[in-house]
Image (cartoon, grey):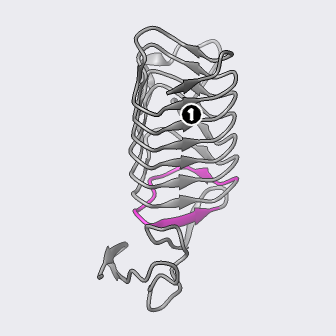
Amino acid sequence: MTVHPTAIVEDGAQLGDGVRIWHWVHVRAGAAIGAGTSIGQGCYIGNVAIGERCKIQNHVSVFDGVTLEADVFLGPSCTFTNVRHPRAHVDRRAAYEATRVCRGATIGANATVLPGVTIGAYAMVGAGAVVTRSVPPHAIVTGAPARPIGWACRCGETLPPPDLACPGCGLRYQLDGAELAVLT
């Protein structure tokens, strides 16, 4: 485990083997961070669960109510929110909505994820996207608000239509309704 001397890790935070925490990070007491996870400089980690082998780039705040499953990648300065209608003068802590980022998903730099959504397994959220509703597994979404533009393989390659065979690892998929199913 590596914790930079400028980082603050509160007593009670649970850090798995091989966790790396870099410059000026603040980890709250209720955080549980899985083995092999890396947290870049300037991050804030609330009372959240973070899975194994996640990569959290610089200047990301993972607020209460957010759960990251294993192998999630968060690009620099992506943003999670935990209430839909914030006001400085109104205490909305009781209104926090849960947000789940499923196994292997990627969220690009400067993307914003509204509360109460699920980013499906191996989905990709493009840089700068604004996610206002749940994203299906393997979907690629971009824009504001984020809309589907294609499909991604587990390895991260874009799946070319119409055959949906991965040019990187060779896995083949087929569309099953509005979701992708692995063939091989």
Residue 64 percent across, percent down from the top left = 47, 25
Name the foreground residue: 70 vs 84: 70
User: In the displayed structure, would residue 158 be above or below residue 69?
Assistant: below
* Residue 49 occupies quadrant: top left
How crowded pointer 1 is (Cα within 10 Å; few <14, some 14-19, many 20+) is rated as many
Q: Is residue 90 part of the magenta span, yes or no? A: no
- Overall secondary structure of the magenta stretch? loop
Is residue 132 located in the magenta-colored stretch of the structure?
yes
Name the residue at 39% across, 39% down: 51
Q: Is residue 69 above or below residue 86?
A: below
Left or right of 68 on screen, residue 38? right
Front one among 51 and 68: 51
Q: Relative to 66, does residue 55 appear above or below in the rendering?
A: below
Residue 11 vs residue 68, the one in the foreground = 11
Q: Quadrant of residue 144?
A: bottom right
- Magenta residues span 128-142
Q: Residue furthest top?
A: 11
* Figure quadrant of the C terminus: bottom left
**Residue toward you, 98 or 104:** 104
Q: Amino acid at mark 1?
A: Thr
Secondary structure of residue under mark 1: loop
Residue at image x 47%, y 81%? 166
The residue that appears at 40% across and 63% down in the rendered structure is 137
**Percent coordinates x, y for residue 147 in the rendering:** 57, 64
Residue carrying label 1: 81
Residue ID at (54%, 73%): 157
